[in-house]
Amino acid sequence: MYSTCLFCNSNLGSNEVIEHFPVGRRLAFDATTGRLWVVCRKCERWNLSPLEERWEAIEECERAFRDTKLRASTDNIGLARVSEGLELVRIGRPDRPEMAAWRYGDQFGHRRRRYYTYAGVGVAAVAGIYVVGPALGLYAIGGGAFLGQTPQLFAQIYRRAFGRVKVPMPWMEKPLVLEAEQVAKVNLVADDNPLGWALRVPVSRKRFVLPDEPRRLGDPPLPRLEYTERVPHAATGKRKTSALFVGDEAIRVAGKILPKINMSGAGKDDVQRAVRLIEDDASPHRLFGTQAPRAIAGSEALAAKGRRIKEIPKPMRLALEMTLHEDTERRALEGELAMLEAAWKEADEIARISDNLLLPDEVEGWLARLKRRR
């Protein structure tokens, strides 16, 4: 039983209503397909549960949903609030746009609210300095011009604080760490591989080390490294390094990066536009493939450089993230549950490390003794 969000590593909480699945404060279930999700109340993402923990829990969710009177539903999707604050989302037979709106509307809306909350606090703090500062003997520099740039400044601070991402690499002991500035420079480029596109990711040559030993049959292809001279330092020979990912590895890396690029969230209109883009059951490869030609359209310079993902129109970026998420679940449901469980275990391990970072050894010993007495 896993209790940590796959995406933000937050604790999912618990409930005492569903005996066979006491995890989470909001559960979504689809009895027809046998899917059960725990919805993280912090990031609003849907965590698909391991197969062996679903069936009895789904039956309990169905009974609890029918027994409660505090519910609202359409023909396809219902929401019920049962005892102890547990919320149940019952999935019937919705079409894809309706299902996507339920799954991702809250998620992108939550990001948007958080983004504007931080920006509002920042603007209020700076405005307070200008109003209260003179009375305290503090004087700001730049006057109204700086105050007018405050929203953009705090947007940059927000992205730098929360835009860092870790991408596990199968051949590296530690995950690849991309700072916000690197994430912002990830490019979608045309490539001569069968899919016609690749993902160009700026990396540190010291930290990004490719294995020397031969690869086993069936292992994902290694990225190709590219070196480009830094124009301001061309005379010194300094170069920047990029890794070119293709195929499923490009999809996996994009799945880690896109939530950070889309971290400011979106309103209902943008979400609906994104939903319409994936109505045709487009796969991630197909959606990225439609963007690659647009990335290089216009000039030879663009053909060589590609297009930064952050510059792609927001509805398409949201659609790419949605379809990547759904593709991961599709793979899990087709038998790749080992991948899903490995992700849960990794999330739990990261959460435990984070929880224990500030705990002194004597506190950990005291907690261990308490557990043994129970």
Image (cartoon, rainbow, N blue to C red):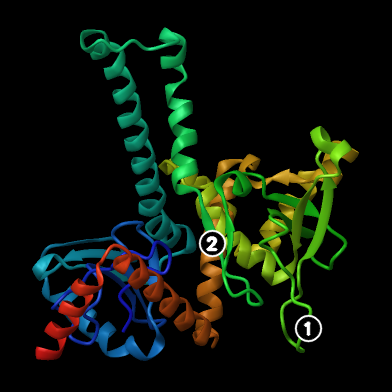
| Residue at 34%, 41% in the rendered image | 113
Establish if 21 lies above or below 26.
below
The amino acid beneath tag 2 is: Lys
Around disc 2, counting alpha carbons within 10 Å, would you say few (fewer than 14), some (14 to 19), or many (20 or more)? some
Q: Position of residue 59 (x, y in %)?
A: 25, 86
| Residue 374 visible at all | no
Q: Are marks 2 and 1 in contact (CB under 8 Å)?
A: no
Measured in 3D between alpha carbons, the distance from the residue under mark 2 to the one under mark 1, in whole angstroms, is: 24 Å
Around disc 1, counting alpha carbons within 10 Å, would you say few (fewer than 14), some (14 to 19), or many (20 or more)? few
Establish if 318 lies above or below 115.
below
Establish if 108 lies above or below 286.
above
Q: Which residue is mark 2?
A: 166
Q: Is residue 330 left or right of residue 265?
A: right
Q: Is residue 6 left or right of residue 281?
A: left
Q: Which residue is mark 1?
A: 213
Quadrant of residue 372 within the rendered picture: bottom left
Q: Nearer the viewer, mark 2 or mark 1?
A: 1
Q: Which residue is nearer to you in this view: 74 or 216?
A: 216
Quadrant of residue 141 within the rendered picture: top left
Q: Earlier in the sequence, mark 2 or mark 1?
A: 2
The amino acid beneath tag 1 is: Glu
Q: Position of residue 29 (x, y in %)?
A: 32, 75
Q: Position of residue 154 (x, y in %)?
A: 43, 31
Dot 2 lies on which element?
strand
